[in-house]
Amino acid sequence: MRLGLLLLLACLELGEGGGNGEWSRKSCQPLTVRQRYQEEVCINTDILLSLRNTSQTTVTTCTAASKLRIASTMEGHMKEDILSKNQSPEAETCSPVVIDNVRLNGPALNINATESFLHQAMDIIMEDAVKKATDVREKVCEWRSPEQLKELLDLELKDEGESETEILQRCRDAIKYSVKTTHPRFFNQLYAGMEPYSMVASFITEALKPSLYTYEVAPVFTLMEQAVLKKMIEVIGWEEGGDGIFNSGGSLSNMYAVNLARYHHSPDIKELGLSATQRLVLFTSQECHYSISKAAAFLGIGTKNVYVVPSDKRGKMIPSALEELIKKAKTEGAAPFMVNATAGTTVLGAFDPIEEIADICEKYNLWLHVDACWGGAALMSKKHRHLLKGIHRANSVAWNPHKMLMACLQCCAFMVRDKTGLLQRCYSAQASYLFQQDKFYDVSYDTGDKSIQCSRKPDAFKFWLMWKALGAKEMEKRVDRALAMAKYLTQEIEKREGFRLLMEPEYTNVCFWYIPPSLRNLPDSPEFWKKLHEVAPVVKERMMKKGSMMVGYQPHGDKANFFRMIIISPQVSKRDMDFLLDEIHNLGKDL
Ligand SMILES: *Cc1c(COP(=O)(O)O)cnc(C)c1O
Ligand SMILES: *[C@@H]1O[C@H](CO)[C@@H](O)[C@H](O)[C@H]1NC(C)=O
Ligand SMILES: *[C@@H]1O[C@H](CO)[C@@H](O)[C@H](O)[C@H]1NC(C)=O
Ligand SMILES: *[C@@H]1O[C@H](CO)[C@@H](O)[C@H](O)[C@H]1NC(C)=O
């Protein structure tokens, strides 16, 4: 009887998904008899359960209740027969437990098959998403219209799953029709290039799936986040230290800043809401990234309470104009609470004069936030950090290592100079199921309550690993190289016929017009600008359909459409700069 039971159990395990052989073998021997039974008996759970007495092979239909009864009898035998023989505790699960027709013993996922799938997928990732994607001879993009792409991707989700082969093909297709932002000729965004260390960190965190709220569930990444923030805070120059948190985006960091500044101004808002205060006004420059108006709308400040400070023609906030607006708000009876300065604007790459703005903030007791999402990287360079002179006087800073420093998306730090736990007080909700105060370790390491998110990716790890690998020195070299490359491109643009700079760049945003031969002899008239305005969109369309490169264009204020070239990656060389200008000319010379 006991032997029969064992046979049956062994066979049960084998019957499941056909693939958990290893586990079964360990706990439900003997193998040879099991093999004998596998075909005849292991067909489905109902049959198996009716075969409790192996000498009698009649198949009966079991009711749920009898299944349970049988199962529990078997469990009893298991304890005697198997556990007592010093088997692993897993063996206990060998007794078939079936509830609502679902067999609950053993894993329902074959980890060996999963592993093999991952290996194959990894090969595809290496080949197509890494090697091919960064190969300059390959296309940057495979442009398809949404209709064509819908057709190609067969997007509909169905009841039945597909084979592994089909799924791997879907992976290849997803890569094929995606834009290769790591390609040396992708200049379209404020991020670019392949950074292997942060990429590996991403893979690791995807595999481990940690969530950064408590030390208990993410011990390693909690400490790494702290280490990275400490270092970034040092680079900013807050000698007393500070506090911070990584967010899923610079836009979110900016929202944190607005909300934190408001909380600092009127702490009652947290409990009483907006009625606890008078009309609040914040100040930002004309060049402002759209995330500020989103923040104002989202936080109940109101977009009309964002006072836009004029910038000079280089895109820098004019401090005297800021002071005028602060006075104006005060005479209106409103309460100014914060100034947003930008270090590296999105389009022109302009740096606001932080030192002068900080003077005004001190005078009027306003929170100074510096949006250094894009320009923060210049802090890594002794040669260029002067661009952010005065940043140590800011109350908060947003800085995205995923932009100029090339960490994988997303990697965005929000940092505050405050060391009194302001961030914690502003955001904490003290969820008792997560942040128990009576845990067995130092709960100050449970940093998640500073965040408005609950689950949060350990983005800091990406920056930590690359910093370990490259050191601050290599990052400094890269920043210096990118700025030198921008200088080279600027000189080429000045030399070449048909190209015209908007202005001498401060950072690696190189903004310029391409003037096709047909427009070169026209005078600087509205007619000329109207025609020029139409050039960049057509060149862009052509480059994307060809797949040769990607570079952005936009109008700005009263300026007609121009190209905004962005230089980031050390993969990029002088040859790519020359290519950019040659290619724009080739694509647009007939216009
Ligand atoms: C990119 C950028 C942002 C937004 O950052 P995301 O991570 O894209 O949300 C905000 N401000 C400036 C100046 C930026 O360049
Ligand atoms: C699962 O993988 C391990 C190690 O690769 C191997 O020893 C074992 O035989 C495999 N089991 C099955 C059922 O394929
Ligand atoms: C098992 O089967 C044998 C042979 O048919 C029978 O004698 C015995 O009573 C059965 N035992 C149980 C528990 O059903
Ligand atoms: C500050 O200005 C920058 C760029 O001008 C913008 O990206 C950001 O959204 C603004 N943030 C806040 C908090 O105003």
Image: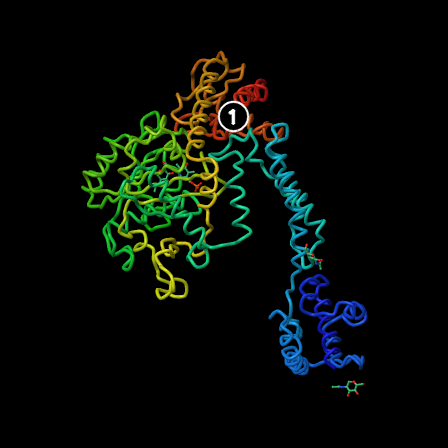
Above or below for 517 versus 213: above
Asked whether residue 98 appears in the rendered view, the answer is no
Q: Position of residue 497 (x, y in %)?
A: 50, 13
Q: Position of residue 422 (x, y in %)?
A: 28, 52
Instruction: Establish whether ligand 1 lies closer than 8 Å to the Cβ of label 1.
Output: no
Q: Residue at x 75, y 75 (%)?
A: 47
* Residue 292 in which image quadrant: top left
Judging depth in this view, the residue of 336 and 139 nearest the camera is: 139
Judging depth in this view, the residue of 253 and 69 nearest the camera is: 69
- Could you tell whether 438 is left or right of 540 in the image? left
Give, as a three-letter code, the residue at label 1. Answer: Ala
- Could you tell whether 163 is left or right of 519 in the image? right
- Could you tell whether 131 is left or right of 484 in the image? right
Element under label 1? helix
Q: Position of residue 230 (x, y in %)?
A: 35, 44
Asked whether residue 105 appears in the rendered view, the answer is yes
The residue at which mark 1 appears reads as 536
- Could you tell whether 541 is left or right of 238 in the image? right
Above or below for 436 versus 249: below
